[in-house]
């Protein structure tokens, strides 16, 4: 079965410092990997995705993610954190499953990012 | 485009009551799905649909029903609410390709007493 793991429940970083939110995946075929962000009392917003090609994927709000096939990881990064980046971040992998080959998302448990001024 | 809309935003139910959570999208997406979000558990798939008239169960379907009579709408019905169904519910939609981004609604917060 496909799965993603986010090993850190919470990440704390000072404003202006680089941030990394970790994600590892387990898939049987080609990985289709996504990062979403959730601000308080809001729905999930798409940040970026890896389908194929360059291992460094650039996304919204200055975020990027590095795909590493040998380590089966897809860590989210940002060179300089902002207080406004504080939110809940979800990694997800998508694969075919079910009666109708539905493209099911498997979500990680989420990592809360706290950026302190 | 309004994107994915959900109503109501918040609802309080008593055990045994029934209700319908509404979801609509105006992007002509084939796929629609319902998730529930509980602390520390990420999002879990309840039911999904790959087109009008076609639905299937996800990971946690018990106690919920769905139907999809149009491309735009995908309501989620709670038949007899239980406290274990207290959660935040998200509707999402996307095109059918596995590389496609899924778009989420703002969520419905449900409290079952």
Image (cartoon, coloured by chain):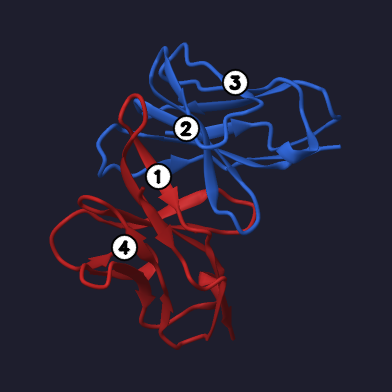
Gap between marks 2 and 1, in whole Å?
A: 10 Å
Specify few, some or many for label 3: CA neighbours under 10 Å numbering under 14, 14-19, or 20 or more: some
Q: Position of residue B59 (x, y in %)?
A: 51, 37
Q: Which chain is red?
A: A
Q: The blue chain is which one?
A: B
Q: Mark 4 points at which residue?
A: A59
Q: Where is residue B78 in the image (x, y as percent from the top left)?
A: 69, 24
* Residue B49 located left or right of residue B113: left
Gap between marks 2 and 4, in whole Å?
A: 24 Å
Dot placed on the residue nearer the N-terminal end, 3 or 2: 2
Q: Which residue is drawn at 34% across and 61% down?
A: A25
User: What chain is tagged by disc 3?
Assistant: B
Gap between marks 3 and 2, in whole Å?
A: 12 Å
Callout 2–callout 4 Cβ contact below 8 Å: no
Q: Residue at x 72, y 22 (%)?
A: B19
Which type of secondary structure does the marked residue at label 2 adopt?
strand
Query: Which of these two is toward me, B58 or B92?
Result: B58
Specify few, some or many for label 2: CA neighbours under 10 Å numbering under 14, 14-19, or 20 or more: many
**Front tag of 1 and 4:** 1
Q: Mark 1 points at which residue?
A: A105
Gap between marks 1 and 4, in whole Å?
A: 19 Å
Marker disc for residue B33: 2
Callout 4–callout 3 Cβ contact below 8 Å: no
Which type of secondary structure does the marked residue at label 4 adopt?
loop
* Residue B90 located left or right of residue A101: right
Which type of secondary structure does the marked residue at label 3 adopt?
strand
Quarter of the C terminus of chain B within the rendering: top right
Labels 4, 3: one chain: no
Q: Name the residue under label 3.
A: B65
Labels 1, 3: one chain: no
User: What chain is tagged by disc 1?
Assistant: A
Gap between marks 4 and 3, in whole Å?
A: 36 Å
């Amino acid at each position: 079965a496909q799965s993603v793991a986010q090993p850190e429940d919470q990440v704390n970083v000072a404003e202006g410092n680089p941030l990394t939110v970790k994600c590892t995946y387990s898939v049987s075929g080609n990985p289709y990997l996504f990062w979403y962000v959730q601000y308080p009392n809001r729905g999930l917003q798409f940040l970026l995705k890896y389908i194929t090609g360059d291992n460094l994927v650039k996304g919204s709000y200055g975020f990027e993610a590095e795909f590493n096939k040998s380590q089966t990881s897809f860590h989210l990064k940002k060179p300089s954190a902002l207080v406004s980046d504080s939110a809940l971040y979800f990694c997800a992998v998508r694969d075919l499953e079910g009666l109708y080959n539905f493209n099911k998302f498997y979500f990680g448990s989420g990592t809360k990012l706290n950026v302190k001024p | 485009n309004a994107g994915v809309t959900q109503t109501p935003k918040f609802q309080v139910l008593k055990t045994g009551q029934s209700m319908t959570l509404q979801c609509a999208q105006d992007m002509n997406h084939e796929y629609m799905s319902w998730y529930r979000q509980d602390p520390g558990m990420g999002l879990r798939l309840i039911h999904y649909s790959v087109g009008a008239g076609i639905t299937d169960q996800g990971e946690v379907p018990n106690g919920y029903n769905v139907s999809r009579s149009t491309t735009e709408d995908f309501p989620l019905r709670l038949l007899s609410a239980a406290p274990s169904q207290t959660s935040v519910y998200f509707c999402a939609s996307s095109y059918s390709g596995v590389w496609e981004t899924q778009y989420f609604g703002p969520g419905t917060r449900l409290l079952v007493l």
